[in-house]
Amino acid sequence: MTAIFDTHAHYDDKAFDEDREALIASLPENGIAKVVNIGASLASCKRTLELAEKYDFFLAAIGVHPSDTGELNDGNFEELKKMCLHEKCVAVGEIGLDYYWDEPERSIQKEWFVRQINLARELGKPMVIHSRDAAQDTIEIMKAEKSEEIGGVIHCYSYTKETARTFLDMGFYFGIGGVLTFNNAKKLKEAAEYIPMDRIVLETDCPYLAPVPYRGKRNCSLYLPNVVETLAQIKGIEEETVRKLAWENAHKLYRL
């Protein structure tokens, strides 16, 4: 059975403080062979690099989440850039726009989205893009900045299959996780059916968005087989095919 690559996790989150080491140690023996831990703030980027240094099968993405861009300035942006040069940093992220929350104001989110896109271009690393309730502005900025030349993944994809076409045309991958298993995820199920399997990667976004039957509990990589099962049903293919293609796609996405 092909191993699973969790392309987007937050094991530095305080939700894992009580059992982080034991949980992470249990992943390889349960078929989780690689994890990319994703930075969201400057502090979490530092913790992310510590995890990548501690565990052979962990990699890092370094970037500031739109909701945390209020902390950025020219000085600490240089610090962020230095962290991106770490040998285990495989991507710039997660970066983007989040209009679900009103903080920080949209102009600040947009400014740092553009600057982090340009950082990814400068460093030759793919992007991990977070876009929530902000499809139009995300697409406009990505097109203006010629993001198709950089590449990456639309993490926790949540828009329609029509919007997926736009991201597909730019050559992006799509992160699919626990939400796919929710009964009310009709739009995502339609998008997942539409998106070619060679553009899908598996992710948890843990500790958030645990799949059924763990919905509402703390998420972790051990629950990804539930996502594989649902995706295989939607696609009408074997679970092993989903595992194999998702594993290959994750390596292509992160250029490993």
Image: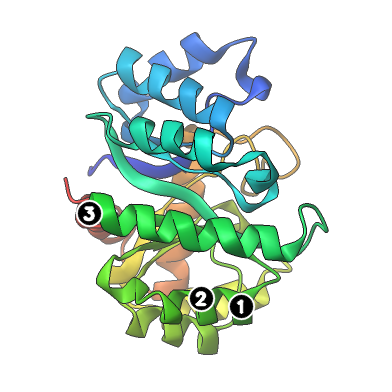
- Residue 120 placed where, x, y %? 33, 54
The residue located at (76%, 53%) in the rendering is 104
What secondary structure is found at the residue carrying circle 2? helix
Regarding residue 131, the answer to whether it shows in the image is no
Name the kind of residue labelled 2 in the image: Ile
Give the mark nearer the N terminus: 1 vs 3: 3
Residue 254 placement, left or right of 101? left
Work out whether 95 lies above or below 73. below
Q: CA distance from mark 2 to mark 3?
A: 19 Å
Give 170 or 187, whichever is nearer the viewer: 170
Residue 2 placement, left or right of 58? left
Q: Which residue is mark 1?
A: 137
Residue sitting at the far front: 74
Q: Are marks 2 and 1 in contact (CB under 8 Å)?
A: yes
Q: CA distance from mark 1 to mark 3?
A: 24 Å
Give 109 or 51, whichever is nearer the viewer: 109
The residue located at (36%, 64%) in the rendering is 200
Name the kind of residue labelled 1 in the image: Asp
Give the mark nearer the N terminus: 2 vs 3: 3
- Residue 197 placed where, x, y %? 31, 71
Work out whether 194 lies above or below 125. below
Work out whether 242 lies above or below 187. above
Q: Which residue is mark 3?
A: 124
Q: CA distance from mark 2 to mark 1?
A: 6 Å
What secondary structure is found at the residue carrying circle 1? helix
Give 47 or 210, whichever is nearer the viewer: 47
The dot on residue 49 is none
Q: Locate the C terminus and report the quarter of the image it occupies.
A: top left
- Residue 14 placed where, x, y %? 66, 21
- Residue 179 placed where, x, y %? 62, 58
Q: Which residue is mark 2?
A: 141
